[in-house]
Each structure stands twice: as C-alpha cells, then as structure tokens.
Image (tube, rainbow, N blue to C red):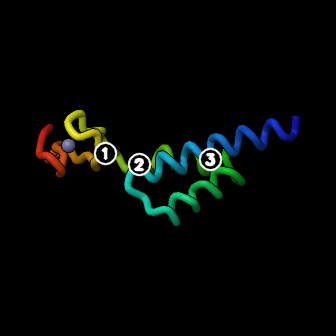
C-alpha cells in the first residue's frame, strides 16, 4: 500500500504542475510546486488552491488569461 500513496501524491503533484503551467507559471516554478505537493501534499495542495492565479478560459481562442474583475476580457482577442 506504500506505493499506492506515492502514486496518488505523484498524480496530484502532476495535476498541480500542469495547472500551474496553464495559469502562466514558468516551468521552473511549476516544478517547484510539483516537488512541494509531492513531498508535502497536506501543506502545499491547499496552499496552491488558495494562491493560484485566477484565470478564465477564453471560449473564443481557447487560451487562459488572468481574470481581473475590472476588465474581464481576453487580452488575445478582446472578447469577454
Ligand atoms: Zn481569446
């Protein structure tokens, strides 16, 4: 059962890694999040969920962009 826990930690860490990249983090920073979540899941998973950048998926061009209430439009195609 030991390996099962490691597998779960890896999968969750990998999800955080790809989530971080899709939210505009660099590879290096996303990898640090991966390591943090992999070794200290209990601490870093909630931390990521709280501090991750708020982004929206643009339904027009399919890109993520940082969402700010003041101007909630996609910077690529200027469509809300
Ligand atoms: Zn767009």
Q: Is residue 38 left or right of residue 70?
A: right
Q: Secondary structure at mark 2?
A: helix
Q: Which mark is residue 75?
A: none
The residue singled out by tag 2 in the image is 22
- Mark 1 vs 2: CB contact within 8 A: yes
* Mark 2 Cα-neighbour bin, 10 Å: few <14, some 14–19, many ≥20: some
Residue occupying image coordinates x 32% and y 44%: 55
Q: Residue at x 47, y 46 (%)?
A: 19
* Left or right relative to 28: residue 58: left
Q: Is there a contact, CB below 8 Å, between mark 2 and mark 3?
A: no
Task: Specify the quarter for ligand 1.
Answer: top left
Give the quadrant of residue 63. top left
Residue at image mark 1: 64
Picture quadrant of residue 69: top left
Residue at 54% over, 46% down: 16
Whole-angstrom CA distance, mark 2 to mark 3, is 14 Å
Residue drawn 56% across and 42% down? 15
CA gap, disc 1 to disc 2? 7 Å
Residue 13 badge: 3
Crowd band around label 1 with a 10 angstrom C-alpha radius: few (<14), some (14–19), many (20+): some
First in residue order: circle 3 vs circle 1: 3
Nearer to us in this view, 39 or 76: 76
N-terminal of the pair, mark 1 or mark 2, is 2
Report helix, strand or loop for mark 3: helix
* Frontmost residue, 33 versus 79: 79
Label 3 CB sits under 8 Å from any ligand 1 atom: no
Q: Earlier in the sequence, mark 2 or mark 3?
A: 3
């Amino acid at each position: 059962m030991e390996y099962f826990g490691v597998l779960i930690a890896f999968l969750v860490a990998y999800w955080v890694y790809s989530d971080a990249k899709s939210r505009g983090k660099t590879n290096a920073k996303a990898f640090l999040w991966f390591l943090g979540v992999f070794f200290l899941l209990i601490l870093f998973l909630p931390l990521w969920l709280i501090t991750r950048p708020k982004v929206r998926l643009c339904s027009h061009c399919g890109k993520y962009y940082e969402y700010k209430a003041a101007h909630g439009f996609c910077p690529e195609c200027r469509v809300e």
